[in-house]
Amino acid sequence: MAGRVRGAGRILAAALVAAVAVREAPAGDGSKGAEPAQPKAPSAGGRAGSAEGKDAGVADDGAPARRAAIRRAVALLAAKAPGLADSEGTPRKPFTQATTGLVLLLDDATTETKSVLPELAASVARWLEKVERESRDQARLPETTGSFSSDRLIQYVWPTGQAALLFAEMDARGVHRDAARAGMRRCMTILGEARASNGGFGHGRQRPGGTSTGRPTLPGLPGGLVVSGGYPETLIAATNVASIGLGAVAAVPGLPSVPDLEPTRRHYRDAQLRNGSFPYDTSQRSADLSKTNAGRTAGALAAMAALAMPRDATWKRASDYVIAETDWMAEGHGSPCLNLMHAALAFRLVGDDARTAFRDRFGPALVASQREDGTLPCPCGKRAFGVTCDDPEATGLTLPAFAEPQRVYETALNAMTLLLLEGKTLRSLDRVPQGAVVTPGRTK
């Protein structure tokens, strides 16, 4: 697809990311369906990107169908991801290209398929160069963290975090290492400058003197009704993506200029709710019942492992919560596909039984949902309050200029999930040292 998505496409993209923020999930959050049975307690966890074992002796009847689905998805990604159009409402393009690069690195792809990797990496690098330049230009920064304006530099943190993971994985595999290290350095600069004072990450920097939370309004509503929306200064989901990238790069031997990880570790300790889950943002202290916390908490667990945090009470509460809420991992706010991919990383850390239960719950469903062209659509069932589906067919945003890149985005993340279920590992996260196991006790 050539050209830049503007006009209606820009509005549609902004509409998707401008879903009113789920501030505090009400008691009784509209969830449907029976609670899943809890798997057995986990054994000692593995490294940040590895399983504790390769499912040895565990029946995996879905493996042949899963591998066939991966092949079809990889073919679609290799054909579509390099030519994605730029979209000004949200930077899905660089995120999708970085994720596709990770898929190609993990997959036993053909030489022809992997030949697109340098093109994807170069495209992501060009975008990062633009972000580094524009993030220091006050005229390009939004006045609020809640801005949805496509005329400003917005939502650049999560693609930068994913780019950092891509370049770290390239380095770990010895693929185009010079370019990978240049990309990692740029990612560290951008993320270091974007991190908030509380150690977390939002969608990016704002103009000096701006406000921390946007309050967009919808005009013309009866009675002068105002609909509040926008983003707070930091978001757990954005912090998860950034932290996994930071941790992967911090483990690269001999790479300087990595930001201090301790403020972000502290952010996770402060953000956790009493039931072990992680909310939309740190201001939500009574959102324990929200089922959209499930995938976000799995992402936080993967991020804490990437940050080499100790396996202490904070870790155990999150781990226990993730295992108990296995069935809800795809019911996410913001991006269920991202939540599920992060969950696939997290379930490699919490025990064989839990990992197998997760694989058997979501692997066959993803494979069965695959469309004839290889697309892997969003796995959410919209069973909980606040779920925002990634699939354009489900949202009605089917204008080709928006829907086609969105389908590639979904497919890239879901292919990554299937590869992790297949037993593939991120070598960049395997390099992260396991956090020390701490005697149980409160850490906050």
Image: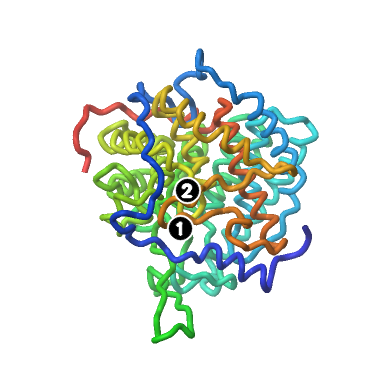
Residue at the location (52% across, 60% down)? 155
Q: Residue at x 38, y 35 (%)?
A: 36
Residues 442 and 222: in front is 222
The residue carrying pointer 2 sits among few (fewer than 14), some (14 to 19) or many (20 or more) residues within 10 Å by Cα, namely: many
Q: Nearer the viewer, residue 318 or 95?
A: 318
Do residues under tags 2 and 1 come within 8 Å of each other at their CB atoms? yes
Secondary structure state at the residue bearing disc 2: helix
Three-letter residue code for mark 1: Ala
Alpha carbon of mark 2 to alpha carbon of mark 1: how far? 10 Å
> What is the x, y in percent for residue 415?
62, 38
Please tell me the numbered disc located at residue 10: none
Q: Is residue 196 left or right of residue 362?
A: left
The residue lying toward the viewer, choosing from 331 and 259, is: 331
Taking the image as shown, residue 335 lies to the left or right of residue 435, namely right
Residue 284 in percent (x, y) is at 30, 57
The residue lying toward the viewer, choosing from 212 and 7, is 7
Q: Residues within 10 Å of mark 1 (few under 14, many from 20)?
A: many
Q: Secondary structure at mark 1?
A: helix
Q: Residue at x 71, y 48 (%)?
A: 81
* Place of residue 355 in the rendered image (x, y in percent of width and height, measured from the top left): 45, 27
Query: Which residue is disc 2 drawn over?
Result: 242
Q: Which quadrant, please, contains the N terminus? A: bottom right
Instruction: Give the labeled residue for mark 1.
Output: 194
Residue lying farthest to the top in this orientation: 57
Q: Earlier in the sequence, mark 2 or mark 1?
A: 1
Where does residue 85 sit, x and y in percent of width and height? Answer: 72, 59
